[in-house]
Image: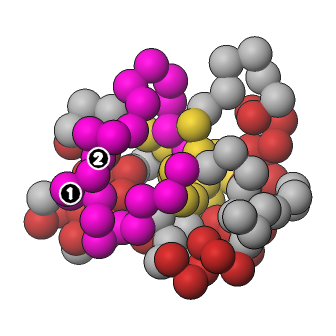
Amino acid sequence: MLDWLLGKRSGDGMHASTLPAKLAEAAPPQVLDVREPSEWAAGHIPGARHVPLGQLPERWRELPTDRPLAVICRSGARSARAVAFLRDQGLAAHNVEGGMLAWPGPVAHD
C-alpha cells in the first residue's frame, strides 16, 4: 500500500486523446475518476464512476471486475497511484495519461 501512496508508476496506460475511441468499442473500459468531489462537480466524463483517491482503499471492492478500468484524474499523477493500488488488488487498471486536462470529449456535470 505504501507504494501507491508514494506514486509507484503503472508502466502502461493510454493517453486521454485515445480514450474516446476505446469507450466506443464493443467492450469499453469502465472510467474511474479519482479526483476530489469539487473537481468531479466541475465536469467529468459521462458514465464515469467517482471514487476519490483517498477513499480508494475502503471502496475499491465497489468497482467492476468484468472489464478493465481506465483511471483518470486532473493530469495523470493521482491516477497512476490509483492504478498501482488497484493492480495490487488484482484489478485490470490503466492510467489515463494527461488526465482531464487532455480529455477531448464531452463532460457531464451531474
Residue 87 visible in rendering: no
- Identify which residue is drawn at 87% across, 56% down: 105
Extreme residue in the top direction: 26
* Viewer-proximal residue among 105 and 99: 105
- The question of residue 57 being in magenta is answered with yes
Q: How many marks can you see?
A: 2
**Magenta residues, as a range?**
49-70
Q: Which residue is mark 1?
A: 57
42 relative position to 5: left or right: right
- The question of residue 53 being in magenta is answered with yes
Q: Quadrant of the N terminus?
A: bottom left
Q: Looking at the image, is 80 positioned above or below residue 11?
A: below
Residue 86, horizontal then vertical, whole percent: 30, 45
Three-letter code, disc 2 = Trp
Cβ atoms at labels 2 and 1 below 8 Å apart: yes
Q: Which residue is mark 2?
A: 60
Q: What numbered label is drawn on residue 27? A: none
- For mark 1, give the secondary structure: helix
Three-letter code, disc 1 = Pro
* Res 100 → quadrant: bottom right
